[in-house]
Image (cartoon, helix red, strand yellow):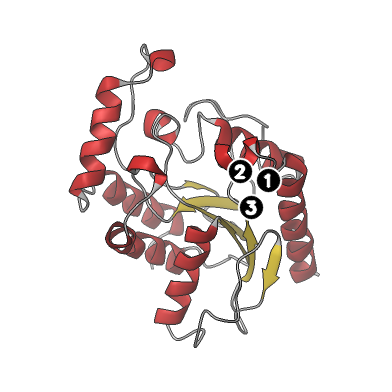
Amino acid sequence: MKNVSSALEILQEEIVACRRCPRLREHCETIAGVKRRAYRDCDYWGKPVPSFGDPHARLLILGLAPGAHGSNRTGRMFTGDGSGNMLYAALHQTGFASQPRSTSRDDGLTLRDAYITAAARCAPPGNKPTPAELRNCRPYFERELELLGDVKVMVALGRIAFDTYLDVLKARGVIPSRAPYPFGHNRQFSTGPGQPVLISSYHPSQQNTSTGKLTEKMLVDVFRRARKLLAATAS
């Protein structure tokens, strides 16, 4: 089998070149051309956003989709907007990120024993990819699951990410039904022998953080749980 790092790099190149969803590609390219006033001097990425992290990670984090002026601008998952600021602060506090803030794909931030991916790789209008668009993108995530053979804990950020992962498990016959897995914040689930422990979390979206539905402490607690689970599997 090819080296995991090389195989993941090839996969990410395929993702960046993907044009399976015309609506999403048009939206991302339009945003990249028009820009937000605060970023008018920036060169927007405007393409599908590749995943990011340690190819031998034991923690896999699944998000929803790139932000229009975050990852769609910077070209790296959860980078350049409020969602990323909260996520990387929490990852840094719990030892999974080398620094607490991510501003660009060249800012030197590295992930330690963690890998970040998303259910959709293109910024969707209104942050709402359609079911068909999610299905188009899912094979990339499934290939990552196959390549990331060391994963012991999966953190799903938001209901769509949670459902995407459970759909994959159901399609593979790992679980017979999604019914025993009710979504909620910082809930822990077993999906069967040899499968990663699943933790569900509210997404660090502006809507959730501005209303207080999700606080930084609540998100830190999710990754503290993940850290404890990894420590237990190592002992």
Q: Which mark sits nearer the N-terminus, 2 or 1?
A: 2
Which numbered dot is residue 170? Answer: none
Q: Which residue is mark 2?
A: 208
- The span from disc 3 to disc 1 (Cα, nearest Å) is 24 Å
- The crowding category of the residue bearing disc 1, from other C-alpha atoms within 10 Å (few below 14, some 14 to 19, many at least 20), is some
Please state if 211 lies on the left or on the right of 136 as rendered: right
Secondary element type, mark 3: loop
- Residue type at numbered disc 3: Asp
Q: Which residue is mark 3?
A: 113
Residue located 39% across and 14% down the image: 37
Q: Which mark sits nearer the N-terminus, 3 or 1?
A: 3
Residue 87 x %, y %:
62, 41
**Is residue 17 something that shows in the picture?**
no
Secondary element type, mark 1: loop
Residue located 26% across and 37% down the image: 27
Residue 113 x %, y %:
63, 52
For the N terminus, which image quadrant? bottom left
- The crowding category of the residue bearing disc 3, from other C-alpha atoms within 10 Å (few below 14, some 14 to 19, many at least 20), is some
- Does the residue at mark 2 contact the one at mark 1 (Cβ under 8 Å)? yes
**Is residue 102 something that shows in the picture?**
yes
Q: Which residue is mark 1?
A: 214
- Does the residue at mark 3 contact the one at mark 1 (Cβ under 8 Å)? no
